[in-house]
Image: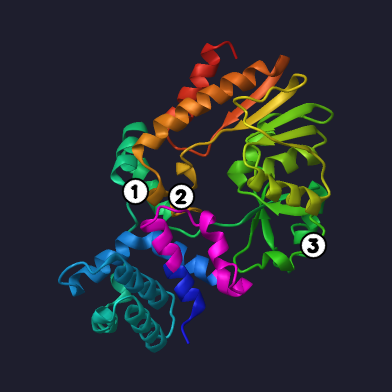
Amino acid sequence: MADRARAAALGLLAGVIEAGASLAEQAESLASLSAPERARATRLATAVLRQAGPLDRALQPLLKKAPPLPVLNILRLALVELLAGEAPHGVVHEAVEAARRVNPAFAGLVNAVLRRVDPKAVRGEQRLPGWLRDALTQAHGRRAVEAMERVFARVPPLDLTLRDPADRALFALEGAEDTRPAATLLPTGSLRLAPGVQLSALPGFAEGRFWVQDAAAALAVRLLGEVRGLRVLDLCAAPGGKTMQLAAAGAEVTALDISDERLARLRENLSRTGLQANVVTADALSWTPEAPFDAILLDAPCSATGTIRRHPDLPYLRQARDVAELAALQSRLATRARAWLKPGGRLVFCTCSLLPEEGEHQAAHLVGQGM
C-alpha cells in the first residue's frame, strides 16, 4: 500500500510548481489524512521546495537529461528523506512505486539514481528567482541577499503571543534553574518555542491563552503604543493575530477583511481565546466606517517576500509584475485609511515584504501626504 503522506506531498509539489497553487490553498487536499499524515506531507513538501536547487545539483550528475517534472519531484522527495536519515531501502522502494504510478518507463531510472546518489552532495542554499534576486540585490546589496538565502534555507522557529504576559511562568521561563524551559522570551515580548516542544501539549493551549504568531508580525501592534480604551481598526485583519493582540491590550477593535473565508478563521481564534472584536467582511476600497478611529493598523497585501523562510512555496508563485500591482493597491488602501483617522490619530502601515516599493516608498508617500 502506498505511503499516503508521501503521495500527498507529491500532490502538493505538483500543485505549487505546475499549477501555481500555494500550500495553503491546497489544504483541503489533505482532509482525508490523519493529523500526523498531514503534518508529514506538508513537512516533506516544504523541505523539497526549500532545497530544490541543491537537490537538483546533487541529482544532475546521475541524469543524462532532466526527467519529466513529476518524476523529478519523486527523486527530490526521496533525496530529502534520505537526508533526514530514513531507511534507504524503504525510501527507494516507495519512490520506485510512485514512479510506476506516474510513468512505468521511469521506474528503473528512479531505482538506479537513488541507489547511487550521495545525500552529502546536497550542499549550498536555494537561490531566489532571478527577478527577485536582482531586485533585492539592487535594494540591499549582494551580501545581504546571500544572507537572506541562507536564512530562507532553514526551518523557521515557532513563536507565540500570550493573551496575558503574566502567563510566562506557564512555560517555565521563571522558576527552578533545573527546569528546561519550553520557550525563550524574546526581547520583543514574543515567546520562541524550544525545538521538539509539541504545541498542543503546552499548558493553556486548550484555554486559548496564547496563539502562534511570528515575532516580527507581532511588532506592528506594539508600534501603535497604548491602545486600551481606543477605537482601533485592524485593516486586512485575517487570520487575526494582530486583532487578538489589540483586543488583549484592551482596545475596541474592528477587524475588517475582504475574505469571509479567512475571517472564519479569525472568528474561530477569537472564540478560542475568549477575546472580542467587531468582525466586518468588506472591501476596504469601497467600505466607509460610521465614525473615525483613534488608531489604524494596515497590514497591507504584499508580495510576502519576507516570509519565504516559513512559506518556501512563495518563490514559485510570485512574478515581478505582481509587485507593481500590489504597490498600487497598498497606496490606495493607505490613502483611504488615512482619511478614517481622528485628528491626531495613529496609523501603522506594515507589510511582510523586503522590497522598498512595498515598504519605504509607501511610507515616504504617506509622509508626503501630510502624515
Nearer-the-camera pick, 370 or 72: 72
Q: Position of residue 12 (x, y in %)?
A: 45, 63
Bounds of the magenta span? Answer: 11-39
Q: Secondary structure at mark 3?
A: loop
Given the image, on which type of amino acid does mark 3 rest? Ala
Q: Residue at x 69, y 50 (%)?
A: 265
Q: Residue at x 36, y 43 (%)?
A: 145
State yes or no: discs 1 and 2 in contact (Cβ < 8 Å): yes
Q: CA distance from mark 3 to mark 2?
A: 30 Å
Nearer-the-camera pick, 23 or 261: 261
The image shows a total of numbered marks equal to 3
Where on the picture, by quarter, is residue 27? bottom right
Identify the residue at the far left of this view.
Answer: 64
Q: Up-down: is 179 above or below 316?
A: below
Question: Is 127 contained in the magenta span?
Answer: no
Q: Position of residue 64 (x, y in %)?
A: 15, 71
Please tell me how crowded label 2 is: few (under 14), some (14-19), or many (20+) other residues with Cα within 10 Å: many
- Is residue 248 rendered to the left or right of residue 341? right
Where on the picture, by quarter, is residue 218? top right
**Residue 128 disc label:** 1
Q: CA distance from mark 1 to mark 3?
A: 39 Å
Q: Up-down: is 3 above or below 182?
A: below
Please tell me how crowded label 3 is: few (under 14), some (14-19), or many (20+) other residues with Cα within 10 Å: few
- Is residue 64 rendered to the left or right of residue 320? left
Nearer-the-camera pick, 293 or 307: 293
Q: Up-down: is 353 above or below 157?
A: above
**Residue 308 disc label:** 2
Q: Up-down: is 360 above or below 16?
A: above
**Location of mark 3 (residue):** 206
Answer whether residue 60 is visible to the viewer in this image. Answer: yes
Q: Earlier in the sequence, mark 1 or mark 2?
A: 1
